[in-house]
Each structure stands twice: as structure tokens, then as C-alpha cells.
Amino acid sequence: MIIKTLPLGAIEANTYILIDEESGSAAIVDAGDCNKKLLEALSDNRIRKIEYILLTHGHFDHIDGVPDIKKHFPDAKIAIHEADAPCLGDDSLSLARGFGRLFSKKVNADIILHDGDSLPFGNDEITVIHTPGHTKGGVTYKIGSCLFTGDTLFYLSIGRTDFPGGSYDVLNDSVMRLFELEGEYTVYPGHDRTTSLDFERQHNRFVRWKNR
């Protein structure tokens, strides 16, 4: 699998493009913007079809580009957890209004996600792990040895919990759930650089370990 990383939008949220080379299927994880840079990346001749627009949560800096991407690729299915789906049509819930940005182009989800759901992707599958705490509908997408954590887990940090629907205790439990996954994973967060799950298990001081 090929993974391209593009920091996009006003707050430079990471947009990821996943390409399954064998099938030519592609998926987009989060979309801070739909600009020339993104469209050029999506013109990769290894891409035959964009299957999904996978949203880790509903904050504006991760969904601003979704309506325009959907216009360019109408067959791509927008997927978001049920608890954050209303953010796609509400400037207040997405925090766009609070940051002085109106998300005027509304869009609806094609796939409403729940914990444990799986989506076929080439010869692999994408597993949905509900990881609330930053938002009520935050999710992590697991595919192979990769975790796309949105604003749940960052390099040496975790997501903010001071927005509506946020809770440190809930987020801590979500991160601990990721830490309890067996084996090693590369972590692709919603902002900043990639990291590894084992590195965060050992060094992330924002996580309160239980039963230690």
C-alpha cells in the first residue's frame, strides 16, 4: 500500500491518500481542503477508483475539502461515525462557526460507521475503532500495520478535550485501547509527524496508564 501525506487547510490537518497498487483502489483519510495539490496527487495513474473519503471525526479542519472532493469523485463514499455525522451539515458542531469559518457546502455521509465495522479495500480491509474523547464520534482506522488516529493520538501527545463533546478520561481510555492492540503499528495522526505505537506506549506522557 502506498500512503501519501498532505497537510491541508487552515490548520494543516493531515490528509492521507491510500493506494492499493494491485487493485488500483484509493481512499482518502480526512480532507482539510480540496486544492490543486490534492487533485494532482489524486491524478496518480495507479489510482483506478477512489473508494472512500474516510473521516476520523467531524471538526471543520478535517472535513472542509469533502464537498468539493465529492463533486470531483461522486462515487467516493463518505464515511464517518454516527456520533459525528451531524457535523457535516452544521457549522457549529464542526466548530467552523467558532473559528470564524462557515462550512457553507453541506454534504451527507454515505456510510455511517460504528465500532468494529470493516470496509473492504483491495485485498485488505479497513477496521473501524471507535476512539472518542476528542469528539464523541472520533475513530481510528486500522489497515494492515497502520493506524490513522485523527486527533486521538499524536506524536508524544493526544488530542484536545476542551471542545464540546471532549473528555480527557474518555480520550485516555481510547488511547489505552490502541496501546492494548497486539503488535507494532505505524501511527498516522491528524496533525504533525508520523510515529509508532510502541514509541508512544513508552514515551507519551499525556496518557495515564491504568493498573501500572
Image: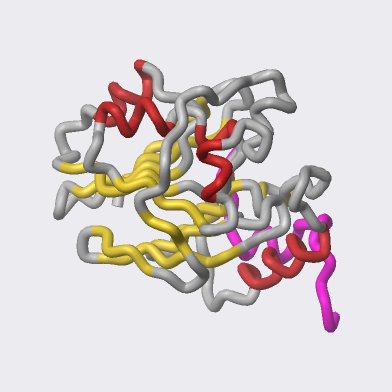
Dividing the image into 4 quarters, which one contains the C terminus?
Answer: bottom right
Residue 8 vs 46, above or below: the answer is above
Q: Residue furthest bottom?
A: 211
State the residue at coordinates (17%, 47%): 24
Quarter of the image holding residue 167?
bottom right
Task: Determine whether, in the image, residue 111 is placed left or right of residue 130.
Answer: left
Does the segment drawn in magenta span residue 203?
A: yes
Task: Determine whether, in the image, residue 191 is placed left or right of residue 183.
Answer: right
Quarter of the image holding residue 108?
top left
Give the image's coloring scheme.
Answer: secondary structure
Q: How many marks?
A: 0
State the residue at coordinates (53%, 66%): 129
Task: Determine if residue 3 is in view.
Answer: no
Residue 193 in the image: x percent, y percent? 59, 40
Does the segment drawn in magenta span residue 74?
A: no
Residue 6 in the image: x percent, y percent? 45, 30
Task: Determine whether, in the image, residue 184 is placed left or right of residue 171.
Answer: left
Q: Nearer the viewer, residue 32 or 143?
A: 32
State the residue at coordinates (29%, 28%): 71
- Magenta span: 192-212
Residue 67 in the image: x percent, y percent? 40, 30
Residue 112 in the image: x percent, y percent? 43, 58
State the residue at coordinates (52%, 74%): 183
